[in-house]
Image (cartoon, helix red, strand yellow):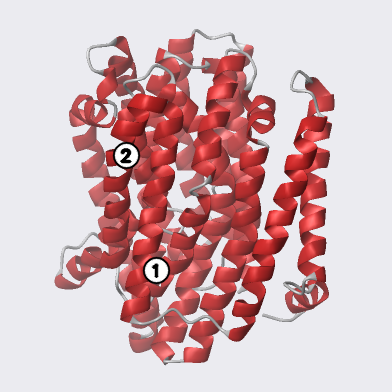
Amino acid sequence: MIRSFLTVSTGTLASRLLGFARDSLIAALLGTGAVADAFLAAFQLVNVVRRLLSEGALNAALIPAWLRIRDRDGEAAAAAFAGRVLGTVSAALVAISIGIALLMPLIITVIAPGFLGSRTLDLAVQNARLMLPYLAFAGPVTVLMGLLNAQGRFALTAFSPLLFNIALIAAIAVLLLGHADAVLAAWMLAAAVGVAGLLQLLMLLSQRSARLATPLRASSDKEMRAFFAKAIPGMIASSGPQWLMVAGAIIASATPSAVSWLYFANRLIELPLGIVGVAMGTVLVPELTRAVGSGDRVAVAHAESRALELATGLALPATLGLIVLAEPIVRLLFEHGAFSVEDSTATARALMWLALGLPAHVLIKALSPAFYARSDTMTPLLATAKGIVVTVGLAVVLGHVFGASGIAASIAAGAWSSALSLLRKGTTEFGFSVDASARKRLPRIVLAAIAMGALLWLTAGLVPAETHGLIKFVALGVQIAAGIAVYGLLLQVLGAASWREAVNALKRPA
């Protein structure tokens, strides 16, 4: 399981790092203001649908169903089922895309009511419509990735998202070199989103993954209706972090540049969330489905315990690091071109509050597979809905008083509300299984993370804020590397991890 986790998290890390490069270039190209707010609001809408479908979300329903049919009826029946899912998803998304295009002014008004009556609304509608072709490609990509994950083949699905960011980076580089007008640059970049989705689909179709879904046809029979009744709640719930961001952006749209500040701050949250959370959801669902289906309680406890250890061991130090180093990280990554010092300060403040919700987001990713493996997708959906209500309720008040930082704090509170709701429900329904090893290791992991955070805090003031260029890059890199080294050493000394055992385990045959 850890080998698969590392495969997925490595691919996600590479994609997220390219995403940083992409967003740094977007910040340099568009800065903040009306054009940037319009583009990022539209891009966030597409990103929600992208995450709704991909990055492990569809695994919640597709993998358990596919594995059950394959084990019960054989490979041919599983391929026929997958072919109907693929055909139905593709046809539905084409129809939905057309409907969204017609209703786009209303949709943008709902997700960004602060744009109403301004030029920003028209720009956001235009950008969103240019991005819509991506949705037609996202459905087939997601199904093919889910089928590969069900077979335990994580490498291709982990690295295929790289093409999305590579295509957008290439488009931005051309626009920067051409010194394009900001509005025209936003339009051309929006159009490149669809091209990026097409490249990802073509790469998956070139592999044998397409044979896992044959014959291809759309269907609305009883089996498909039952599948989507399970799938849709799970897909919505798996995109909880994005829904919370959308809820926050709705309130933030009334404040100039706040949408942009929250977007760029959230991009930094998505790096550790992607590495830990997406990998957790992708690997844990098939692992727990097999264990629950066979009634192997020891295997269930082992999977849940290791997932909780990994989630805590990676999310907690990332949280502390982002809080302590928020401003130097933001300035290094985004303070270029049209992105000003004031933008960096506002984005860093939002980042510090958003980071408080990171452990909750990762905890949700670790807890939700236990429900999905038992074919329960409604409980995670209700937990996500509760988090959205908490986020909106608090954001209305805190956003009015504290601006983007208050909205960021509301998003973090919404995430913790969802996580605690899942924890209570799971404990009551079936009891989360945490073995003796996890009970011993978890407090030691927390202690090591706190010590690492203290080290970063003590060294944060050693580099003057006005430092620029290569010196700033090297200084920040040394701080982060030192924090990681101290954390790893403390895990070994405290007995929370044995690196020799981990390396030996990775060398064993799968």
Where is residue 287 drawn, in percent x and y? 50, 77
Amino acid, disc 2:
Leu
Q: How many marks?
A: 2
- The answer to whether residue 214 of the structure is visible from this angle is no
Of mark 2 and mark 1, the one earlier in the sequence is 2
Relative to the observer, which residue lies in front, 494 or 228? 494
Relative to the observer, which residue lies in front, 180 or 378? 378
Task: Say above or below: 367 vs 237.
Answer: below
Q: Could you tell me which residue is drawn at 42 percent across and 15 percent down?
A: 35
2 vs 1, front mark: 2
Where is residue 457 drawn, in percent x and y? 73, 41
Q: Which residue is mark 1?
A: 423
Secondary element under disc 1, as helix, strand or loop, is: helix
Quarter holding the C terminus? bottom right
Amino acid, disc 1:
Leu
Relative to the observer, which residue lies in front, 87 or 344? 344
